[in-house]
Image (tube, rainbow, N blue to C red):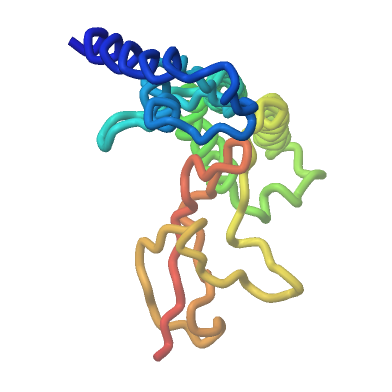
Amino acid sequence: MFQRTFLRQARAARSPLSTISSTTVTPLALRPASRFQTQLPAIAQGFAPRGRFYSTEPEQKDAPKEGEAAEETPLEQAQKKIEEKEKEIIELKDKYLRSVADARNQQERGKRDMDGARKFAIQGFAKDLLESIDNFDRALLAVPAEKLTAAENEENKDLLDLVAGLKMTENILMNTLERHGLERFDPGELVDGKPQKFDPNLHEATFMAKSEAHDDGAVMYVQSKGFRLNGRILRAAKVGVAKNN
């Protein structure tokens, strides 16, 4: 329909131009513009090709919607993997150090157990010998001191030989036990010229009595001597303690 209208207007524009005499021809530049000519640009404007305009800005991706995680770049992914590996390295290092420490502790504990077993392996055997050692002391104390000093008396020669044999046997036995860590201590020995004080870690008080010759708490009588095995008390010494107050 638009084409028909355009053809009608073109025909109407031609008819006045054909009737104009050649003598009255006016220069084209001086002719007044016809209604068609004034309308032509507006009509032709509808047929003018329209150019396409392209944006020079880089295409932007749609922003992530709320609640959706943003897509990670390769650099961020690599950084994340590096952080995960570093955490894994720290955990493995911690496990390694713990295992090394446990191994060392177990090794030291095993060494202590072996040393303890070696040092106190004869503990039961030594306890069984303590009574025999005490019998040596009782046998030697049973001989009066005045008979031991009468060396020129021929009647006491056999007794002196017996006492000397007992002492020799006792010394050999004690020297053998000392080489294995067994040590005997006598609370009746004087320390700086004074009797020893009662020590509950070393002594066992069998009785307490008043004694004017001893200070309060001093050991005044030794019933049996004490023994240590490699520094550990194997048997406390049995003593009598003075109690004056």
Say which of 11 and 95 sits in front. 11
Can residue 108 be seen in the rendering of this structure?
A: no
Quadrant position of residue 71: top left
Q: Quadrant of the C terminus?
A: bottom left
User: Where does the image place residue 229, in percent across and percent down from the top left?
Assistant: 58, 36
Q: Nearer the viewer, residue 162 or 5?
A: 5
One can see residue 160 in this view:
yes
Residue at position x 52%, y 22% in the image: 53
Report x, y in % for residue 49. 46, 15
Residue at position x 71%, y 69% in the image: 191
- Tally of marks: 0
Quadrant housing the N terminus: top left
Residue at the (45%, 71%) spot, across then down: 241
Residue 138 in percent (x, y) is at 51, 43
Choose top left, top right, bottom left or bottom right for residue 157: top right
Q: Residue furthest left?
A: 1
Q: Tell me if residue 128 comes above or below residue 143 in the rendering.
A: above
Position of 125 compared to 173: left or right? left
Q: Is residue 129 above or below residue 212?
A: above
Tell me which corner region of the image, top left, top right, bottom left or bottom right, holds residue 102. Answer: top right
Taking the spot 44% from the left edge, 27% from the top edge, the residue there is 37
Q: Closest to the observer: 91 or 162?
A: 91
